[in-house]
Image (cartoon, helix red, strand yellow):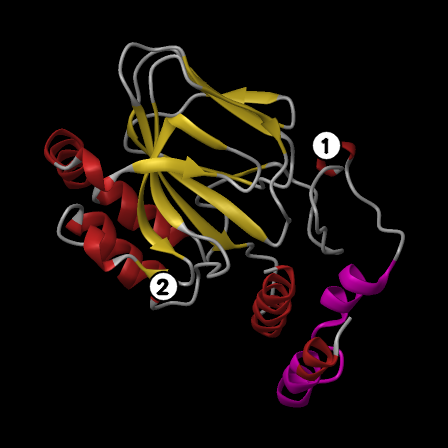
Amino acid sequence: MTPEIDAIFQDVKDRHGADSIVRVEDMLYRKQQERHPLQKNAKWIMPGISQTPWHDPYGHPEIAPVVRAFEAGHAAIRRELDEAWAERKSAFSDYEHYLTRQENWQALYLFRDGAPVESSAPLVPTAYEVLTREVLEQGKLCTLLESHFSTLLPGASIAPHCDLWNFSINLHLAVDIPEGCGITVAGETRQWKEGECLLFDYSFEHEAWNDGVRPRTCLLVDLWHPETTVPEREALVGLITEIRKLMA
């Protein structure tokens, strides 16, 4: 696409092998790519990643330790989140999805714009510590994206949409879940269970709602899809970062 992207790709191939990022190059340069009908509105679909909307949170060795750590810390995470919501609501902001901004969808960010949000550490120390130890230090976070507490206010809904790509995967820790909440991914509806995680490929069309009487909060973590490789992740970070520079 540009000399800068070519140089990024060549550097990865020089270090990892000429065939190490074939799927990334195919995604970028192939005009025709097979995709599931419910992924049609995603921007990027990297070939070779299984077309599986819902994943078992404990089904991937790379992700299972993250799930265990967040679920083990749920009680403290919820207590600290409740205190932050009651005492420091100004730390939350309208969530800025790439498609929309919603006042009834609030967020407290732990990682954003390529870096940890250090001001959140004293507000939600358990979640911040688990994210740092189990995700950031292990290279499992897709640093192109983010991690945040996602709070849907009563009556709020998120319209059906596809997110940008299939090479990251979304982990939800159910922190505080009233009755009347749900999420549908690729036509299959599930409910969050407090203290447990859901894992899904958000390149598939999905939607969520809160028909309950109090806010619904999940901790969202954008992880690398476990079917991607280290050189692919390096190339993808370089590619998307360069594209964002061009778009800016």
Image location of residue 117, percent across then percent down: 28, 57
Q: What secondary structure do most residues of the magenta stretch adopt?
A: helix
Is residue 22 magenta-colored? yes
| Residue 115: mark | 2
Q: In which quarter of the image is residue 17?
A: bottom right
Q: Determine the residue positioned at 61% across, 63% down.
A: 240
Residue 79 lies in what quarter of the image?
Answer: top left
Residue 40 drawn at (x, y percent): 76, 37
Magenta region, residue range: 8-30
Residue 55 position (above or below residue 247): above
Nearer-the-camera pick, 1 or 21? 1
Q: Disc 2 residue type? A: Ala
The residue at the far right in this view is 32
**Which of the numbered marks, if any, corresponds to residue 134?**
none
* Label 1 sits on residue: 38
**Circle 2 Cα neighbour tier, 10 Å, few/some/many (<14 / 14–19 / ≥20):** few
Q: How many labels does the image show?
A: 2
